[in-house]
Image (spheres, rainbow, N blue to C red):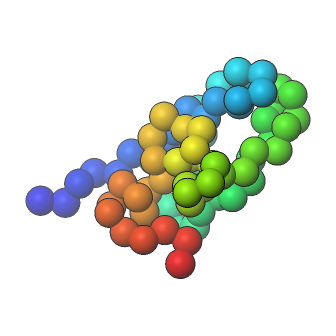
Amino acid sequence: MMQDIIPESKITCPKCGFKKLEIMPTDACQWFYECESCHRVLSPKTGDCCVYCSYGTVPCPPIQQDKSCCN
């Protein structure tokens, strides 16, 4: 049975705490994200493939599908 992909993730800025629901790209990793509130540019934490895996409530679509991400 194929798992349904959750396309949205609420990303939280670690600097100011601002949260925003975003639609994740399904065909690429997102390595940078600028906070709408404080304008800090986020990048993935060490060991994570993208900003959604580091700061989001839902991991990116490739990780949700148990696929390698960012090869």
**Total of numbered circles in the picture?**
0
Q: Give whichever of 23, 63 is nearer the camera.
A: 63
Q: Residue at x 41, y 58 (%)?
A: 63
Q: Residue furthest right?
A: 39
Q: Is residue 48 left or right of residue 34?
A: left
Image x and y of residue 29, in percent? 59, 63
Q: Residue at x 48, y 53 (%)?
A: 60
Image x and y of residue 39, in percent? 87, 35
Q: Residue at x 71, y 23 (%)?
A: 18
Image x and y of residue 33, in percent? 74, 47
Q: Looking at the rendering, in which quadrant would you find the N terminus? A: bottom left
Q: Give whichever of 65, 54 is nearer the camera.
A: 54
Q: Residue furthest front?
A: 46
Q: Is residue 68 left or right of residue 40?
A: left
Image x and y of residue 68, in percent? 42, 71
When asked about the image quadrant of residue 23, the answer is: top right
